[in-house]
Image: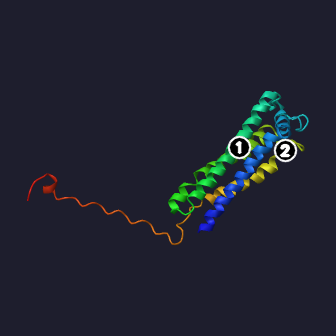
């Protein structure tokens, strides 16, 4: 159904909008989330006497590098979602095989989004830097909401699309007839 294809396009656009807006916000309001990265990596709001403090990073240059990598990954994710939506829109009326193959950008965007918000925020920040212990600088719930939305879209987009109603496949090419052996060799009958 064409509406299913449009739903996949719109969902890709919605995720692109989110990622690109987060990227824009992190660039234009750099200081707010830079503080988040600083506190998470320095682990200064985790439980007192935390035995994991040996993992803390207190070097401002490393905070800036980490934050730059986060912003870049969010931006690339948004660009991939946007490219995926554009590509799906371009082939929305094409045969199912073409539309299914065009999902590659959206699938790649979902993978990168999962890596940023699950691996980055849940594994690295949440567990390695014990962000879960902080009542002030804890982004796990927000990250969870987003990567679950991403996984839902990934599952939906990755469902194979059928042919559109009324689609008539092109006729199969007929094989060329072979000449008899005598004519092939240049012999006469």
Give the mark nearer the N terminus: 1 vs 2.
Answer: 1
At label 2, counting other C-alpha atoms closer than 10 Å, the crowd grade (few under 14, some 14-19, many 20 or more) is: many
Image location of residue 144, percent across then percent down? 77, 51
- Left or right of 117 in this view: 101: left
Residue at x 89% of width, y 38% of height: 45
The disc placed on residue 75 is: 1
Image location of residue 43, percent across then percent down? 85, 35
Residue identified by numbered label 2: 138
Q: In the picture, residue 64 is in which quadrant?
A: top right
Q: Which mark is nearer the camera, 1 or 2?
A: 1
At label 1, counting other C-alpha atoms closer than 10 Å, the crowd grade (few under 14, some 14-19, many 20 or more) is: some
- Left or right of 67 in this view: 180: left
Q: Which residue lies furthest to the left in this view?
A: 189
Residue at x 73% of width, y 46% of height: 117
- Left or right of 148 in this view: 96: left
Indicate the secondary structure of the residue bearing disc 2: loop
Classify 21 as above or below 171: above
- Left or right of 101 in this view: 3: right
> In the image shown, does 146 or 93 lie closer to the viewer?
93
Classify 183 as above or below 135: below
Indicate the secondary structure of the residue bearing disc 1: helix
Q: In which quarter of the image is the C terminus?
A: bottom left
Q: In the picture, residue 128 is in which quadrant?
A: top right
The disc placed on residue 85 is: none
Q: How far apart are marks 1 and 2 (CA)?
A: 22 Å
Image location of residue 95, percent across then percent down? 50, 63
Image location of residue 94, percent across then percent down? 52, 62
């Amino acid at each position: 159904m064409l509406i299913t294809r449009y739903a996949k396009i719109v969902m890709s656009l919605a995720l692109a909008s989110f990622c690109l807006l987060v990227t824009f916000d992190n660039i234009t309001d750099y200081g707010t989330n830079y503080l988040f990265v600083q506190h998470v990596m320095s682990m200064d709001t985790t439980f007192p006497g935390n035995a994991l403090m040996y993992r803390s990073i207190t070097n401002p240059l490393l905070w800036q590098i980490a934050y730059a990598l986060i912003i870049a990954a969010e931006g690339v994710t948004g660009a991939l979602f946007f490219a995926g939506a554009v590509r799906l829109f371009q082939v929305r009326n094409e045969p199912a095989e073409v539309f299914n193959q065009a999902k590659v950008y959206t699938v790649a965007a979902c993978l990168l989004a999962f890596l940023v918000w699950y691996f980055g925020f849940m594994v690295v920040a949440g567990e390695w830097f014990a962000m879960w212990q902080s009542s002030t600088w804890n982004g796990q719930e927000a990250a969870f909401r987003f990567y679950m939305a991403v996984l839902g879209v990934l599952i939906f987009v990755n469902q194979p699309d059928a042919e559109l109603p009324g689609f008539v496949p092109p006729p199969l090419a007929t094989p060329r007839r072979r000449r008899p052996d005598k004519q092939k060799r240049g012999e006469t009958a």
